[in-house]
Image (tube, grey):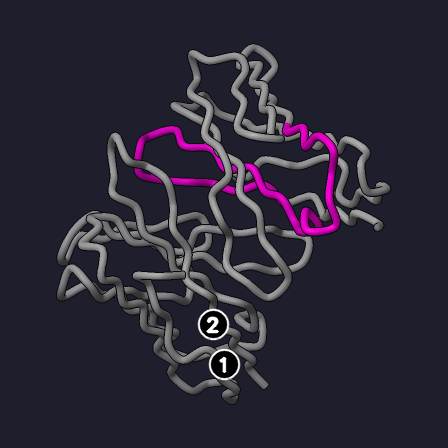
Amino acid sequence: DAGITQSPRHKVTETGTPVTLRCHQTENHRYMYWYRQDPGHGLRLIHYSYGVKDTDKGEVSDGYSVSRSKTEDFLLTLESATSSQTSVYFCAISGGFGANVLTFGAGSRLTVL
Amino acid sequence: SQQGEEDPQALSIQEGENATMNCSYKTSINNLQWYRQNSGRGLVHLILIRSNEREKHSGRLRVTLDTSKKSSSLLITASRAADTASYFCATDATGNQFYFGTGTSLTVIP
């Protein structure tokens, strides 16, 4: 997990509250990703970023927004958390073309009551 | 869904045996990768095979790729208890988007 940290690592919140998860990297990688992991579904891509202020949707982006104001930080926001968003969230980074291997953070476990 | 699927979902073997897991995917790809996840941890990259390759080796790992069948297999030879983990395939079609399968849970019994 060296070079990539997620915070918070654990969070319990209530339905309807906003939640922001932070991913911080020290590798100066261009690409950053947010995935969620649920039993029976594996990892599903939520959003990704290909540069500062450049983001795009993944396959399960509804209910999530992201922002990247600096190369090193990628934020995932749940505007109004729902119980279906209870999951483990992983951030990953990649150097992009020619170096397209993902390095993952340790994960953030979110419980929405 | 752009996800692939791994087969079997769960596999239990004795230490020293070989473990084979399969991955099927849906779209054309640039490369396919395999990752391992130990319980409660993030995923770790194991091996990458490009679409123009048919087989690749790395230590005790052997990966094959059949693009005509849109499938790949991961073979772990002479398994060890430390190989106990979940294994995921991931496809890369564009160079910057990675889609994962549902995973195979491997248990190696000492």
On the image, numbered disc 2 is attached to which residue?
Answer: A108
Q: Residue shown at 40%/80% (left/top)?
A: A8
Q: Residue B98 colored magenta?
A: yes
Horizontal and vertical percent for residue A80?
41, 79
Tell me whether the residue at label 2 lies in contact with that at label 1, contact meaning CB atoms closer than 8 angstroms.
yes
Q: Could you say which is closer to the camera, residue A53 or residue B78?
A: B78
On the image, numbered disc 1 is attached to which residue?
Answer: A10
* Type of the residue with mark 1: His
Left or right side of B62 for B95? left
Magenta span covers which residues? Answer: B74-102
Q: Secondary structure at mark 1?
A: strand
Horizontal and vertical percent for residue B18?
77, 31
Q: Residue shown at 38%/46% (left/top)?
A: A102
Horizontal and vertical percent for residue B11?
80, 42
Q: Secondary structure at mark 2?
A: strand
* Type of the residue with mark 2: Ser
Q: Residue shown at 67%/51% (left/top)?
A: B85
